[in-house]
Image: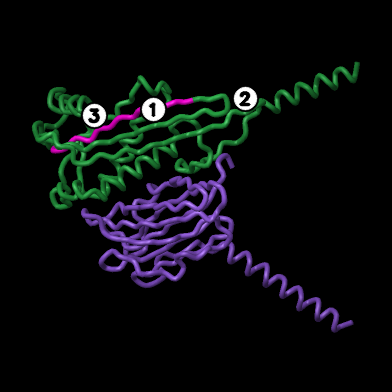
Amino acid sequence: MKTLISAALLATLLTLTACTSGPVVRTDPTDPSRATLSLDQADVNATASAMVDSMLASPAVARVADVNNPPTIVVLPIRLDVNTITDPRINTDAITTLVRGQVINSGIFQFVDATRRADIAAELAYQHESGMVRSDTAAQRGQQIGANLILEGTLSGFASDTNRTRQRGYVITMTLQNLETGIILWQQTEQVQKLQQRRTIGF
Amino acid sequence: MPNTIQTLKLCSVAILSGVAALIFSGCQAPGNPNAGLPGEVNIQSLPNAGIEITGILNADGSLNLSPQVGQRMGRGDFIVDNIRAAYTDSGFPRVEASLSSISRGRISIQYRFAWFDANGMEIAAGTGGWNTLSLAARETATIQGVARSQDAVQFRILARTFTPGR
């Protein structure tokens, strides 16, 4: 009987130990050592960095860039090609945000964000129409800067599996276009490819 | 007998000094980007951590030839074949380094750039993440970094081989 109880206790202890999570540690979001098949944070960081490098090195961008009078870019969210990518965890906004942040800080462009227009309009309406804000401190309407250029992008993917491997590919393209003329000033494509060997035994 | 004790004491002091020297050399910050003259490129091996390339740009954005280019540093699987720099048309410093595998198999290399202004302050700290480069046996590839500010005059590249999943 004692042996039975001991065995049950041991089994319970082992089960509980297996379910226990370890301590949480902060890691480097750019470290690709522990890659997954998906487009992970390290890929997003590397892609954004390569996009900014390309933009800052582009002769066509240099022609329109002016530190003293920086052109204004409107940023549109990167379009996800849902026909080729079905993973809902892929965050395309992060690429745009990282690119925008690094280019803003370089000083050669200034940005307006198309996705925030409704919020800005709502805040202006509140300041002017609610009667709650002193009129001399309210932000003036009609003072926004019109963009000269538009930055947009697409993300599409590939998947090919064999008995031994699983492979995923991602193609991220960003384009900078003149709003008036429609001329594409800069375009850069970054490709990410992931390969995973299937295990013979295991999960 | 007193001679033996004296010898033991001397040995202890020597061992402790050696241990202290090893500890302090291990704690040293890798590469001071402020050290050196304009145009100078320095490549050094970081024990078990790859290599570090530091450099200071000339006024025209270029770099001088370095005698360490083409040399195997430490026990690494790759060498720096060439390194050059120039300003982009927008006026941002750009550095390119050619890395050549000396391995018989495919290797993965992680690398990251950091840029510093004339005072040695890092520019856009935290934005220069790790990038990955995959090289076939004996293959050469170029890595490139562009500074996020036109004020950048110094750079540091860390490059190391890594095994995915570790």
Name the mark nearer the viewer: 3 or 1: 1
Residue B14 coordinates in the image, percent (x, y): 71, 75
Q: Is residue A154 magenta?
A: yes
State the residue at coordinates (49%, 59%). Answer: B79
Give B164 or A120, whichever is nearer the viewer: B164
Question: Which numbered tag is attached to residue A116?
Answer: 3
Q: Which chain is purple?
A: B
State the residue at coordinates (81%, 19%). Answer: A8
**How many residues crowd mark 1 within 10 Å: few (<14), some (14–19), many (20+)?**
many
Q: Is residue A155 left or right of residue A7?
A: left
Q: Is residue B64 left or right of residue B87?
A: right
Name the mark nearer the viewer: 2 or 3: 2
Identify which amino acid the numbered label 1 is placed on. Gly
Residue B86 coordinates in the image, percent (x, y): 28, 60
Name the mark nearer the viewer: 1 or 2: 1
Residue B161 coordinates in the image, percent (x, y): 53, 50
The residue stretch that appears in magenta: A148-160
Question: Which numbered tag is attached to residue A203?
Answer: 2
Residue B115 coordinates in the image, percent (x, y): 36, 57
**How many residues crowd mark 3 within 10 Å: few (<14), some (14–19), many (20+)?**
few
Discs 2 and 3 share one subunit:
yes
Q: Is residue B86 left or right of residue A17?
A: left
Q: Which chain is green?
A: A
**How many residues crowd mark 2 within 10 Å: few (<14), some (14–19), many (20+)?**
few
Question: Which numbered tag is attached to residue A157?
Answer: 1
Identify which amino acid the numbered label 3 is placed on. Arg
